[in-house]
Image (cartoon, rainbow, N blue to C red):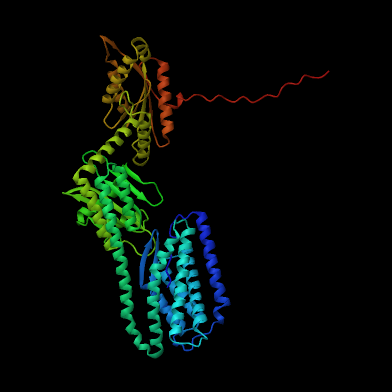
């Protein structure tokens, strides 16, 4: 029996655990080499051989390893195969060295060609195959050869050989998971052996039948195909029933989380973690579409990362494409690898994912979101049809929770709070205009966009003239009112695509979306001057009129955001020096002249007398 470890499958294995795994692999390989060189050549061969060529044994091990049962333990998958049937038959019918090399080559071909294993994981499994096969041959030769008993004693020797091989394999799997950082107690080893030993001994017993049958009537070996298949089917049925039981438990827990929790973010992240565990997946995501103008949100649970709950999803292209494909085809739950060129296949190709499943959440004709699961852990198998049915059930629970209204109310409350916080962080609290942060962000976005379409924007810097006397004479309340009224008039004076912002104090700015020329800028400046000419009521029968100094700078292909802002600011200060109510366009002549450097002179030395 040769369980296959998948403990090194994590792509980002830390250097320290990887170093320990390498040392473990070297130790196992050294022990296997010592057996192969110092012990196996000295073991007696079988009394009778079947006469099969060595390559036939390789093919037998190859075929035996293809008939497997996969069992998952946390992140790691273990494959129990029909290899022990071939191994026991080989103990009776071929030389120990030929048997061990045939097993290593045959199983190695399965790992490389069928399971696509390479690197450290392949090295670990090959070293373990060599060691366990060598130990089995040694135990069988020690117990079964040179004894006065035959028949039943040899059978016990063969079963003991398989038992030793299975225990050593289990120890190797447990050890490699421990050194790779997986937290496993010693009880996990008993779980591995509890699953593998009965299977191994049952297969070994069929191997004994195969060896005795082959010695007497090789054609009768075909009769063993049926019990071997039934044994594999029975273990697969057991594992499937065990998995379904776990899934039912998870569904009950998830239902309680979604229906009973008063904390929507925590409920969603716990739900996604449960989904990820149920499918042994690297990542689970839930995208929820808000009603009306409410933004979409993303919640995610990913292996090795802190969960994300209800984060605003600004780019929804991927989610929209998946929903559109599901709506068009009518397949609301699907997985990759079905050969239909689906949007999900394109999504996994674009993001370099191994595999994925998606369930679009629809209730009463409304698409509420989608549940996406990606990256099946381990190299054995991918998402199957049974996984799709379970994913659909998980999705239905989420959709039902949303449809019942409670979870949706919690989500709306959280989303509204996030929107309020985001608005407060990006807007001036007094005037409600965008603040400096949002103005710079939009300016940088416009410049990047102009780099592709050639529609270059312009920036206008505004500094109010006469604001300080109003503030000092009538007080801060009157000054705040003046700023609020001017901000509203400025917002109305610019085009809908432009951005008027308050930078701080009595300084404002306008981003004029491109393309725009001098004539277009003059139209905006004229509207701003008209707004400035109107008196502003300050209350108590008082009013004030203020002017402004305006600086304008155009952008171009050689202009970055820092340069554009500096030029507009420089033009504004130039206008302020020239007098109240003027505007200045930036030009190279406005740049301060560089002060020429004066070379240092050598100190004069007075002549000596």
Q: Which residue is located at x 31 percent, y 68 percent?
A: 238
Q: Position of residue 479 (x, y in %)?
A: 33, 16
Q: Quadrant of residue 375?
A: bottom left
Viewer-proximal residue among 597 and 485:
485
Q: How many marks?
A: 0
Is 196 left or right of 339, judged from the image as shown? right
Residue extending furthest toward the left: 364
Please say whether residue 273 is visible from this viewpoint. Answer: yes
Residue extending furthest toward the right: 609
Is 576 left or right of 366, judged from the image as shown? right
Viewer-proximal residue among 361 and 430:
361
Q: Position of residue 293 (x, y in %)?
A: 23, 38
Give the quadrant of the N terminus: bottom left
Residue 268, above or below 243: above
Please say whether residue 65 is visible from this viewpoint. Answer: no
Viewer-proximal residue among 291 and 238:
238
Residue extending furthest toward the front: 148
Q: Quadrant of residue 559?
A: top left
Q: Position of residue 508 (x, y in %)?
A: 35, 24
Q: Position of residue 140 (x, y in %)?
A: 49, 80
């Amino acid at each position: 029996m040769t369980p296959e470890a998948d403990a090194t499958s994590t792509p980002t294995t830390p250097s320290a655990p990887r170093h320990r795994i390498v040392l473990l692999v070297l130790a196992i390989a050294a022990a296997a080499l010592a057996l192969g060189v110092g012990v196996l050549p000295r073991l007696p061969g079988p009394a009778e051989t079947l006469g099969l060529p060595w390559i036939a044994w390789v093919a037998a091990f190859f075929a035996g390893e293809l008939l497997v049962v996969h069992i998952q333990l946390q992140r790691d998958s273990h494959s129990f195969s029909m290899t022990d049937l071939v191994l026991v038959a080989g103990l009776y019918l071929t030389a120990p060295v030929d048997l061990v090399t045939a097993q290593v080559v045959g199983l190695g071909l399965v790992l490389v060609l069928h399971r696509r294993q390479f690197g450290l994981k392949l090295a670990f499994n090959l070293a373990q195959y060599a060691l366990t096969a060598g130990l089995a041959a040694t135990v069988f030769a020690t117990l079964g050869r040179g004894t006065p008993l035959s028949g039943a004693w040899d059978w016990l020797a063969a079963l003991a050989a398989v038992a030793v091989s299975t225990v050593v394999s289990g120890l190797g799997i447990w050890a490699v998971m421990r050194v790779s950082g997986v937290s496993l107690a010693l009880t996990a080893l008993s779980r591995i052996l509890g699953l593998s030993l009965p299977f191994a001994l049952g297969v070994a017993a069929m191997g004994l039948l195969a060896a005795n049958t082959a010695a007497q009537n090789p054609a009768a070996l075909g009769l063993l195909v049926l019990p071997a298949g039934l044994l594999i089917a029975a273990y697969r049925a057991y594992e499937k029933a065990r998995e379904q039981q776990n899934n039912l438990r998870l569904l009950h827990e998830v239902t309680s989380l979604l229906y009973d929790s008063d904390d929507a973010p925590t409920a969603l992240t716990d739900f996604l973690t449960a989904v990820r565990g149920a499918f042994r997946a690297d990542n689970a995501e839930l995208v929820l579409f808000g009603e009306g103008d409410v933004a979409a949100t993303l919640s995610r649970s990913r292996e090795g990362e802190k969960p994300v709950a209800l984060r605003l999803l600004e780019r929804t292209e991927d989610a929209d494409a998946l929903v559109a494909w599901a709506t068009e085809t009518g397949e609301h739950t699907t997985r990759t690898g079905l050969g239909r060129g689906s949007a999900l296949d394109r999504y996994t190709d674009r993001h370099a994912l191994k595999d994925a499943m998606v369930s679009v959440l629809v209730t009463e004709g409304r698409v509420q979101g989608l549940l996406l699961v990606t990256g099946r852990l381990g190299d054995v198998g991918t998402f199957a049809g049974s996984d799709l049915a379970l994913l659909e059930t998980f999705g239905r629970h989420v959709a039902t929770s949303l449809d019942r209204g409670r979870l949706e109310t919690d989500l709306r409350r959280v989303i509204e709070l996030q929107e309020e916080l985001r608005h407060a962080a990006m807007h001036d609290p007094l005037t409600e205009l965008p603040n400096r942060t949002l103005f710079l962000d939009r300016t940088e976005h416009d410049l990047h966009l102009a780099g592709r379409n050639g529609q270059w924007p312009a920036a206008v810097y505004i500094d109010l003239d006469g604001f300080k006397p109003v503030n000092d004479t009538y007080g801060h309340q009157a000054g705040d009112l003046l700023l609020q009224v001017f901000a509203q008039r400025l917002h109305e004076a610019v085009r809908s695509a432009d951005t008027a912002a308050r930078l701080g104090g009595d300084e404002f700015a306008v981003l004029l979306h491109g393309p725009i020329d001098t004539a277009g800028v003059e139209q905006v400046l004229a509207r701003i001057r008209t707004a400035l000419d109107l008196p502003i009521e300050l209350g108590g029968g008082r009013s004030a009129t203020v002017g402004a100094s305006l600086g304008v700078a155009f952008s171009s292909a050689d202009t970055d955001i820092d340069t554009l802002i500096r030029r507009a600011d420089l033009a504004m200060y130039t206008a302020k020096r020239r007098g109240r109510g003027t505007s200045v366009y930036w030009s190279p002549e406005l740049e301060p002249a560089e002060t020429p450097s004066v070379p240092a002179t050598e100190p004069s030395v007075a002549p000596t007398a």
